[in-house]
Image (cartoon, helix red, strand yellow):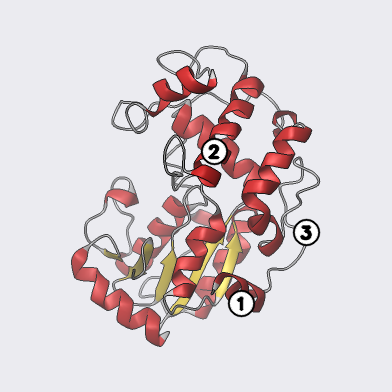
Amino acid sequence: MGFPGTWMTESQSMVYRVVPKCACSTIGQIMYYSDHGTFFDGDIHDAQGGLHKWALEDSQHLITANVRSHDSYAFTCVRNPYTRVLSSFFDKICGIQRNGKRYRGNLVPLLIQKYGIEVGGDDGKQDFDQVKSFRRFLLFVRDTIRWRRPMDPDIHWSAMSGHVSTFIVNGGRYDKIIWTESFNAGMADVMQAIEAPYPVDLAQIPRFNESEGHGPKRAHPVEDYFDDLSMHLMYEIYKRDFNLFKYDFENPGNKMPIGEIDLDEVHKKLGD
């Protein structure tokens, strides 16, 4: 299977396992900058050079050799499951993507028809009942993850532990898992642990939020979107994410972690 979703600097200073909706655009740009002293002009996901990626065939043997022998500092980044799935809804379901079209073509019409979801009209900017539509989207997410119907789960809302685990199962080991919610502190630990060709001043790094502005703004506090049933579904879908990455399942309004991540526990539980 190899190391899908893995990026590595050309200098091989660091290796990163991408987890969608967890600051991946910003991390990719920091990696790019640390090698080249400049940011990639455009969405880093579109870069075909300047950064080794598993999706680029010429990079695969270099990534495999590095990860299996643990030659470089390896890390990933996670996010509160409540805010991550909300972000997926507003960006991928309600938003118009950067190509000017809806995400995955017929996905949104399918959701409108089968689940009764509203998305804010053709441009995603009109008022609609965000809470009702999001809760219906969550039913769809559960259906995709539990029964792979009406489609396979999408990378943007499949569990973070699933993304994180492929790296471990295929022979990798993480030195650090950082939280999106305390991004600068976590990324500072990464940068201090490596020798980068170009120093990175994290306080000056812009946030490369490539999904910003795609869809409607969230109209309510996070906790308003999750009633008892929604929380039950969240635990069914993301139980491992809450437990391993130490997020507060009981309080959707608390986006911050409530404990320290135990790397040994992560490797043990996700390495099977």
Indicate which disc, 1 or 3, sits on the residue closer to the N terminus. Answer: 3
Crowding at dot 2, Cα within 10 Å, few <14 / some 14-19 / many 20+, comes out as some
Question: Residue 256 location, x and y as percent?
Answer: 72, 52
- The disc placed on residue 268 is 1
- Neighbour tally class for label 1: few under 14, some 14-19, many 20 plus, Cα within 10 Å: few
Between marks 3 and 2 in the image, the one whose residue lies nearer the viewer: 2
The quarter of the picture where the C terminus appears is bottom right
Q: Which residue is drawn at 51% across and 12% down?
A: 126
Q: Where residue 144 sits in the image (x, y, percent)?
A: 50, 41
**Residue in the picture at 68% in, 73% down:** 262
Contact flag, marks 1 and 2 (Cβ < 8 Å) = no
In the drawing, what numbered circle is on residue 143?
2
Q: Which disc, if any, is residue 258? A: 3
Q: Which of marks 3 and 2 is nearer the N terminus?
A: 2
Which amino acid lies under the numbered mark 1 shown in the image of this protein?
Answer: Lys
Asked if residue 199 shows in the view, the reply is: no
Query: Quadrant of residue 231 in the image?
Result: top right
Q: What element carries label 1?
A: helix
Helix, strand or loop at mark 2 = helix
Contact, CB < 8 Å: mark 3 with mark 2?
no
How many discs mark residues in the rendered view? 3
Q: In this view, does 218 lie to the left or right of 235?
A: left
Split into 4 quadrants, where in the image is the N terminus? Answer: bottom left
Closer to the chain start, of discs 1 and 2, is: 2
Q: 38 or 85, which is in the foreground? A: 85
Looking at numbered disc 3 in the image, what kind of residue is underneath it?
Ile
Q: Residue at x 41, y 72 (%)?
A: 15
Which quadrant of the figure has residue 172? Answer: bottom left
